[in-house]
Image: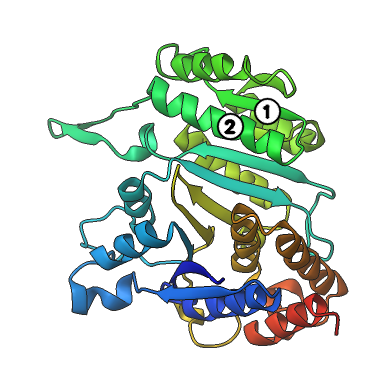
Amino acid sequence: MAYQVTLIPGDGIGPEITKAACRVIEATGVEIDWQVVEAGQDIMAEYGTPLPDNVLESVRRTGIALKGPVTTPIGSGFRSVNVALRKALDLYVNLRPALSIPGVKSRYENIDLVIVRENTEDLYAGVEHMVGEDAAESIKIITRKASERVARFAFEYARAQGRRKVTAVHKANILKYSDGLFLESVRHVAESYSDIEFEDRLVDNMCMQLVQKPELYDVMVMPNLYGDILSDLCAGLVGGLGVAPGANIGDTMAVFEPVHGSAPKYAGKNKANATATILSGALMLRHMGENEAADRVTEAVRQVIGAGVQVTYDLGGTAGTSEMADAIIAVIQGK
């Protein structure tokens, strides 16, 4: 029986890279019934919004989505379509693995890190206002409920994936109430997971540690804003956003998407690197319980990039988006 999955192609390079990812996923033999809905800049004229209700309705119905990058139009009323989607569906976890791929240029080797970012509150929620004409105030909101549930996800993920350690990242030495509550909440959850090592680090020290000795870390859990920053740092350790998959996960729904933007100047040119979207598809397969298929996709990507022949220009090759997908599919199918 086919899985029903919402497909949000997005705009810019989105349609090309999601098409490549869909072809790769289908090559594993996992049957997907794609429910295609549109979001982003290209549908503004028709719907008057970059995030129509039918997109949310589809994800609520299927419970799972693969999404391409979306441009947020100026003046749409949204700070970000991605943030609006997360809030509307209560996708409270942002999951960002950072895994070294042979053949991707980087200063580091053998990186294997996972960022678990709280996705609904903190400064990143954008609760702010002007105070008179010459000052602005942003409100940092941290709640015990949100902190405990993202911490529980981090420990459950570590246990399920055979990871060894969870590190809480915070600034509780200065932000004693907000980050202090986050740290207290994670420590409380950690008491129920004696099989997983637990520690905590100050966010500034964590940045230094990740640059100096990333091998010491495994799964890291943190508030929203720190997660936004450190997940890009970790992507930099493995070669950049072009190879960085991502997922937004709630209790009953999940949306999988690449971390990078829509790069409209490359739209329709068959030049874009679809690796991040394909690896997001592998995360999706794993979330669906199709672990063997997810492993095959990940290994095929590693083999093709490692060979360095049928890869896109940013990876040192001359292949187009579709040709690189062809090469990955050939590996999956043993051709």
Q: Are marks 2 and 1 in contact (CB under 8 Å)?
A: yes
Q: Nearer the viewer, residue 53 or 3?
A: 3
Q: Amino acid at mark 2?
A: Val
Q: Where is residue 18 drawn, in percent x and y? A: 53, 74
Q: Is residue 66 above or below residue 324?
A: above
Viewed as shown, does residue 201 lie left or right of 237? left
Mark 2 crowdedness (10 Å alpha carbons): few <14, some 14-19, many ≥20: many
Q: Where is residue 228 drawn, in percent x and y? A: 50, 43
Residue topped by disc 1: 166
Residue topped by disc 2: 221
Q: Secondary structure at mark 2?
A: strand
| Viewer can see residue 68 | no
Viewed as shown, does residue 47 lie left or right of 315? left
Q: Quadrant of residue 32?
A: bottom right
Residue at 72% across / 49% down in the picture? 237
Residue at 35% across / 54% down in the picture? 85
Residue at 50% across / 75% down in the picture? 33
Q: Quadrant of the C terminus?
A: bottom right
